[in-house]
Image (cartoon, rainbow, N blue to C red):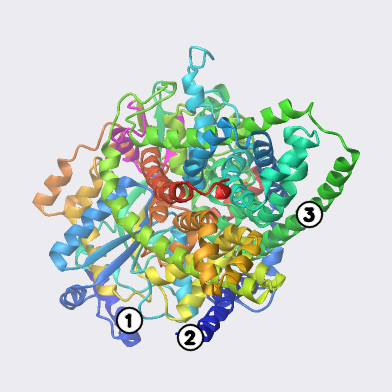
Amino acid sequence: MIRAVSALPLALFLAAPALGQTDPADWEAVTDRAEGQTVYWHAWGGSTATNDFIAWVAEQVADRHGVTLEHVKLADTADAVTRVLSEKQAGEDADGAVDLIWINGPNFAAMKEQDLLFGPFAEALPNWQYVDTDGKAVTTDFTVPTEGYEAPWAMAQVVLMHDTEDLPEPLPSAEAILDWAEANPGRFTYPQPPDFLGTTFLKQTLIELTDDNETLMKPADAADYEAVVAPLWDYLDALTPALWRQGRAYPATGPAQLQLLADDEIDLAISFSPGEASTAIADNRLPPSVRTFVLEDGTLGNASFVAIPYNSGSKEGAMVVANFLMSPEAQVRAQDPDVLGYGTVLDVAGLPEADRAAFEALDLGIATLSPEELGTVQPEPHPSWMTRIADEWTRRYAAGQ
Amino acid sequence: MTATSRAGRLRALPALTVLAMLGPVAAGLAGTLLPAAGLHPAAGGTGLSLGPLRSLLDWPGLAAAARLSVVTGLVATALALGGVALLLAGWAGTRAFRALERLLSPLLSVPHAAMAFGLAFLVAPSGWVSRLVSPWLTGWERPPDILIVQDPWGLALIAGLVAKEMPFLLLMSLAALGQADARRRMQVATALGHGRVAGWIKAVFPAVYAQIRLPVYVVLAYSMSVVDAAMILGPTTPPTLSVQIVRWMGDPDLAMRLTAAAGALLQLGLVIAALGLWRAGEAVVAALGTRWIARGGRGRAADPALRAIGLGAGIFSAAAVLGGLACLGVWSVAGFWGFPDALPDQLDTGSWSRHLPGIADAAGTTALIAAAATAAALVLVVGCLETEHRRGVALSRRGLWLIYLPLLVPQTAFLPGVQTLLLWAGLDSGIGPVTLAHLVFVLPYVFLSLGDPWRAWDPRHAVVAAALGTSPVGVLWRVRLPMLLRPILTAAAVAIAVSVGQYLPTLLVGGGRVATLTTEAVALASGGDRRAIGVWGVAQTAAVMLPFAAALAVPALVWRNRRGLHV
């Protein structure tokens, strides 16, 4: 709550003079104005499970707060960013098409930098009190401080999915992955960078190979970039000939890579959701022999957020949705592998008794590791690393030379 | 209503049509040119600069990507046109041809992305063909590590484009054949002792090609800038230029929009250059053809081989597209389906029950937009063509190119400009603006499908009707429109197909608030869930198949007693 209070003057200063919006901290006023509003939530629509979850959220906020939630299914979050950008260009500052965006990482950094976001609001929401601000990386997004401009709603952590029929034992490190790939050529690949999951694989490998993780928290320009990333290129030069199709083609996205695992074209795949394998097995999208593991030194983790564009005409309704997403009830449902299998952003130990029991009663699924087994979570490097590594990867491995 | 005011209103239609195009085209081009020159304030581009161009040239895959776009476009167009010509030459009027013709509407109705997806699954090392013969024939317990789909030469993409564009060119050719006097030309050629294929190519093809030239150009431009099919079938290291432009558009770094705009201009330049090359090729082929004819050979010996190639091309197209559709159908009801099982281990209709409510909603919106855009386009185009006919002046060449510009400028670069224009006009979001945006893309196709058959209509019919005392309006309604029923319905079916297939215009102009079959299908496809893709792909196909079937069936029914109007 201390955070919420300290954010208050800033919120008043920024929001109030602009359009006479409701102060996020005056929750009663927010819910009053939210009633009857329609919120267009632009969110990736590629997963039936996610779409069904959002439909459930829509029912809940309609029943409780009279907010109509419409899910705008995107193939790419950048489409929503483009929309807000075009509206700003055209002077549509009062009632844009986008009211809420599922966002994180570079998209957030770009929108925040261009002043395309409303806020701060997140830390004034009532359910913020349950969020695990000490144990989970929910106040920074790829090292960029969120400062209340986006509200967290799901935690993600890198796990590796393996088909136990062909690869029975977990591989403890990047070196072990390389050894195994060389012994089993053509059975591993990763989504093609700059796809975020492919870039995540590069970052994860870099963290594995470098001894100096502190450097990665600062902008790449501030470090000796060439020297830091050199081990990564040595590693990939050795790995690429042993990849699926000898690295001459890559799956475009995470789901495409998952499909290769299901088709038995590969035996090892990276995922950014510890529950994804269990959900996919339940959905017939992966064979039941798939399990997950993490690397011994830990794996990357980050949070998914929702943000509100500066020109939304339904900011109060959007805040109601963001607040509901952080509620114990929505969080326990999202973590259920039969629904979504997403990690919670809440501090479960600090929840009221009944809510805690609901979390503890969850069966996380056959291929999902327990929070203890997931081990150390490593923070995301500064976004500049991601950009530079992805660019250079393209130059080295995808330029047809 | 007096005749003068009616004529005056008719005269306004060409101007209105050009206006409907001019605004969006100008905005679209400005929306491409300005950012390419460094002007895009919201993305941090505030002054003229060569930065975007430099960053485009800095991209190491540029040469390979540009080459890929040009080669796949030219090769796919040439193969599709050649296949259609040989098929028509060798088989028109035969039972095999009629069987293929009956497949036309399903072939045309499968959306490009769905076809690409199905084809990719069909031929991949872990795909359906491989599953059907493994392990008993191949000995494969695990799929072999062979690069078939996404090969660096773009062969899989070319195959997919040929399979999908052949039906379109065949449809256009069939519409044109009615006005090409094919039967009598062939009678003369046969009487002179020409072989079937050689005679057709010499006597009929030039008349058909003259009418389908613009559709061929559109196929070329489309094949060079296609995005969805190229993402699925095309190479990725590097991808084609159009795919890379979309990647830049989607880059979180907003400055990359400027690079994308520069790339789009390059794409436009490549398309124009390829069209010029094709035009030059036409002259060369015409010169060679004239010499070939003058040499006087009858070309009978080549008939069997050429007929086999023609039929082979037709069967390839049908098998690829329908096989792809079958893949979608089977996946839509599949339980777990691993390699090397020939079929899923159990049937599961859960995907259908899960998606049907959404499909019903989206289908209503899709039909409304498609019907409105198609009706508007037909009125404008028929009005233009009729004015042109009555005043005896053809739409100027520049006017014609203007109408085709939306098909030549890559959509990704053109649409943000249109979106900004609509926002400025206060028309953002909703079904109305989306219909207008669809009209921009539907209109050229209607013009394209209808223009040449309309102009090829023998004006002596009008003279005879006028001599019998019929007014110009009466000639239009009672003679011309009925006689041209087939091309008109064909144009309408193409228009509906185009409207149903629009992804980016619907998404960008609708602000994401207008959900059609295609926007929902593409969003789901990005998740790679084959069951969901199967369900939505089948639904999308069905939405287009109905009008196409009507376009083929209705004229046959109406003209069952008008032999001269049969094809």
- Displayed quadrant of residue A192: top right
How far apart marks 1 and 2 lie (CA) works out to 61 Å
Residue type, mark 1 in image: Ala
On the same chain: label 1 and label 2? no
How far apart marks 1 and 3 lie (CA) works out to 58 Å
Residue type, mark 3 in image: Leu
Compare residues A200 and A260 and report the one nearer the observer. Answer: A260
- Displayed quadrant of residue B431: bottom left
Magenta stretch in the rendered image: A268-288
Marks 1 and 3 in Cβ contact (< 8 Å): no
Q: At 63% across and 65% down in the image, what residue appears?
A: B404
Q: Does residue B72 show up magenta in the picture?
A: no
Residue B80: % across, % down: 65, 42
Q: Secondary structure at mark 3?
A: helix
Residue A289 in view: yes
Residue A15: % across, % down: 32, 81
Mark 1: few, some, or many residues within 10 Å (few <14, many ≥20)?
some
Residue type, mark 2 in image: Thr
Residue wearing tag 1: A15
Q: Secondary structure at mark 2?
A: loop
Residue wearing tag 2: B2
Q: Secondary structure at mark 1?
A: helix
For the N terminus of chain A, the image quarter is bottom left
Residue A308: % across, % down: 34, 69
For marks 3 and 2 on the same chain, the one whose residue lies earlier in the sequence: 2
Q: At 51% across and 23% down in the image, what residue appears?
A: B130
Q: In the drawing, what numbered circle is on residue B277? A: 3
Q: Is residue B43 above or below residue B133?
A: below
